[in-house]
Image: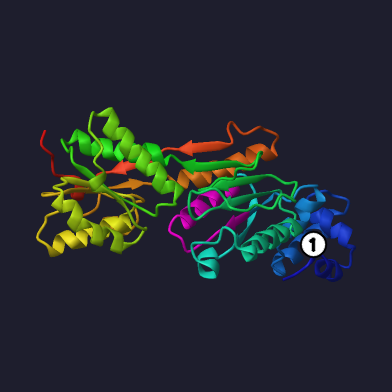
Amino acid sequence: MATIKEIARRANVSTATVSKALNGKGGASQKTVDNILALASELNYTPNIYAKNLVSGESRTLGVITEDLTVFNTPEIVDSIDEICERNNYHYILGNLRINKRFGHDFSYNIAYHKLVDDMISAMLSRQVEGIIYVGCNTNAIPYFSQNSRIPFVCAYCYSNLPGIASVVYDDTRAAYDAVSRLIAQGHRNIGMICGHKDSEASAHRRQGYLSALRDNGIAFNPDIVTSGDWVWETGYNCSAGFLANKVTAIFAHNDIIATGILDYCSENGIAVGQDLALIGFDNRRVSETSRPKLSTVALPLYEIGKKAAQLMLDILSGQTPPAQKIMVNCHIIERASSACKGAL
């Protein structure tokens, strides 16, 4: 790649003259300027925006740290951060912690995880980033955050309990409430719920939404048709027999993967989901569109989370105070064939 020094050597002028000519600041004859611009084009010169911004006193660069790029929610969040940066003439440096492959799901108290976060933040600071957006792979509180940096942090799809760190997350409780309320509006009264991991904050919030929907509609809670497992296919498949024995007419599954286990069990046992049983999942993953029948689900506002997190960071950098430490974005329900059947109205 050609540099200013190379252009200066070829034009037989100083690097300062080349810099002024490339930036339209004059200081040389028109013939010299024309020659410099022609050489820059011939040599495919690309200006070093990073260095140029540093000279102006700002890098116009953000750091984006993802816990794990392979998790389904992360790419769309990063994509929307990229869009907001592009609109505002900002650049970003992406760092991926690869937490799942390094530590699995239980990394909260792992000292190696703490060091990894510290090292990633230090690397971002060495590149003169103005702020860091931390993208979680679940909606829990971040178990560790370095407090040594004086630049702003914003969390996306997760949050921090440290004061001064704003976050953008979605409203799990409201989403579950809306999903169960849809089933109730269709006449279902005996609605089962298969939860994710019992220690998950998301699972606890979705459980609360379910209970609130039952209470607000005068339906008594039946503990026999609520169970916890994990976020896997086996949980849905293995719990289905007991739920159907309790004559549920609808099931709210805490994610789409659990729901696919229910679909497979029903298919093997002659139960037509969407006709004999209503089913709603959560996350709107790709499998919800390819399953048979297609799965009704809660769609996560991933684009909005990334967009709001990036805009929030730019607002903070411009001197604005965040409107709240935790900003909640609403989900929406996508109704497909799996929840088409009515209950006993």
Q: Is residue 339 left or right of residue 8?
A: left
Q: Position of residue 30 (x, y in %)?
A: 83, 54
Q: Residue drawn 31% across and 39% down?
A: 210
Q: What is the span of residues highlighted in magenta in the rendered image?
A: 64-86
Q: Quadrant of residue 108?
A: bottom right
Q: Position of residue 102 (x, y in %)?
A: 55, 69
Q: Nearer the viewer, residue 127 or 251?
A: 251
Q: Residue drawn 68% across and 63% down?
A: 115
Residue labelled with disc 1: 36
Q: Nearer the viewer, residue 41 or 206?
A: 206
Q: Quadrant of residue 318?
A: top right
Vertical position of residue 216 compared to residue 99: above or below: above
How many numbered dots are placed on residues in this image? 1
Q: Quadrant of the N terminus?
A: bottom right
Q: Position of residue 71 (x, y in %)?
A: 46, 60
Disc 1 residue crowd, few under 14, some 14–19, many 20+, Cα 10 Å: many
Q: Is residue 275 left or right of residue 73?
A: left
Q: Residue drawn 56% across and 42% down?
A: 167
Confirm whether residue 292 shows in the render. no
